[in-house]
Image: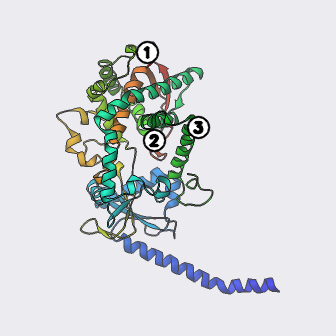
Amino acid sequence: MAAAAEFLDLRAAAPFVVAALAFYFLVEQLSYHRKKGPLPGPSLVVPFVGSVAHMIRDPTGFWDAQAARARKSGAGLAADFLIGRFVVFIRDSELSHRVFANVRPDAFHLIGHPFGKKLFGDHNLIYMFGEDHKDLRRRIAPNFTPRALSTYAAIQQRVILSHLRRWLDRSAANGGKAEPIRVPCRDMNLETSQTVFAGPYLTKEARERFKSDYNLFNVGLLAFPADLPGFAFRRRVTSSLCWAVSALDSHPDVLARVRAEVASLWSPDSGEPITADMIAEMKYTKAVAREVVRHRPPATLMPHIAMQEFQLTESYTIPKGTLVLPSMYESSFQGFPDPDVFDPDRFFSEARREDVVYKRNFLAFGAGPHQCVGQRYALNHLVIFMALFVSLVDFRRERTEGCDVPVYKPTIVPRDGCVVYLKQRCARLPSF
């Protein structure tokens, strides 16, 4: 009898539950449409979760859809809804600059991820403002001057060389079988950064722990954005090297020019590392590095939160609390002639000077007061890697259908992880 009474109570309550859910759904739709205004976006959104299923299932397709909406609208903006948060996607470079230039307590907060503070730490540089932020950047900046970079070059080369030796040994042991290099590149970059910035002060155990934590951090960036037990977020730059290898393989003329330039300045037979003066003379290789970063930006989006209403355009004001997503990836394909074509000469030719003419569309490292402080180091590292790699290694990409389609890991990388055949190119690897 008691069970029957409870069943009857549930049946009696059912209409009220349905009505409450219907009311919640209606309120959420009305709130979404009020915030969306004239922007393109889904006509209906799933309560609370919004479009997150599409984003997790197919992140590349999801962000391509956002970009397509923004492009077709003519406004350079698109709207969506993710995990209880209204979202504005920004494709237009100038509008992205407006966001980057207004990172301050009463406008936009750079967050890096919906749960960025738990991933990066409360006191990370990206969350600072005003004089505190300027002061810390001033103290960090000497680590990335040309003089500082020149002192890192030999250290970087020793680490890169040791990893290339391992790659070649592993390839030979496997009978020359092609293997993906995404994870090996990540491990190489991680050890390089540890060695350059921490020196000999990290023990082997600390390095292994850092490697494990770094992997979980990357998994957390991609995970379902919920801070709940069981999700990877709770447990918790490399892509440019993969794209460089892929681009050099698919553009033999570019590869030949890089090899010729490096060979005119340095030889593996010298037994000495490439000097800072030599790196400075590698102007075409530097242009290739910049084109790699433009063509496949390592950071595709830079999430911000609107702390107050902000009039972004004459016709649209971003509501308070909005998750704002300027797309550095989309900016890279605006302004530049034939932007889909990999063409290092756009940054090498004195007649074209696209690095100057279209400077405001080159947002791979952000812009404004929070622009990446380590961008010189990143580009220099890419140049050094390419110089050593093309000089010491003969390589060939294992080309399969869709192998170079970008996927999020969390930066964009080739779908197949950049599978390549490797073979030693020089008679003897240098030792320095």
Give the image quarter of residue 272.
Answer: top left
Q: Quadrant of the N terminus?
A: bottom right
Residue beneath label 3, please? 205
Q: Quadrant of the C terminus?
A: top left
Disc 1 from disc 3: Cα separation: 34 Å
Which numbered mark, 1 or 3, is in the foreground of this view?
Answer: 3
Residue beneath label 1, please? 426
* Nearer to me, 310 or 361: 310
Give the image quarter of residue 171.
Answer: top right
Instruction: For the residues labelled 2 and 1, say whether their Cβ atoms are less than 8 Å apart.
Output: no
Disc 2 from disc 1: Cα separation: 28 Å
Disc 3 from disc 2: Cα separation: 29 Å
Q: What residue type is labelled 2?
A: Val
Kindly identify the residue that appears in the image at 23 percent across and 45 percent down: 358
Residue beneath label 2, please? 413
Q: Position of residue 417 (x, y in %)?
A: 50, 37
> Mark 1: which secondary structure?
loop
Q: Position of residue 143 (x, y in %)?
A: 34, 40
Which numbered mark, 2 or 1, is in the foreground of this view?
Answer: 1
Mark 1 crowd level (few <14, some 14–19, many ≥20, 10 Å Cα): some
In this picture, residue 141 sits left or right of residue 167: left
Q: What residue type is labelled 3?
A: Glu
> Mark 3: which secondary structure?
helix
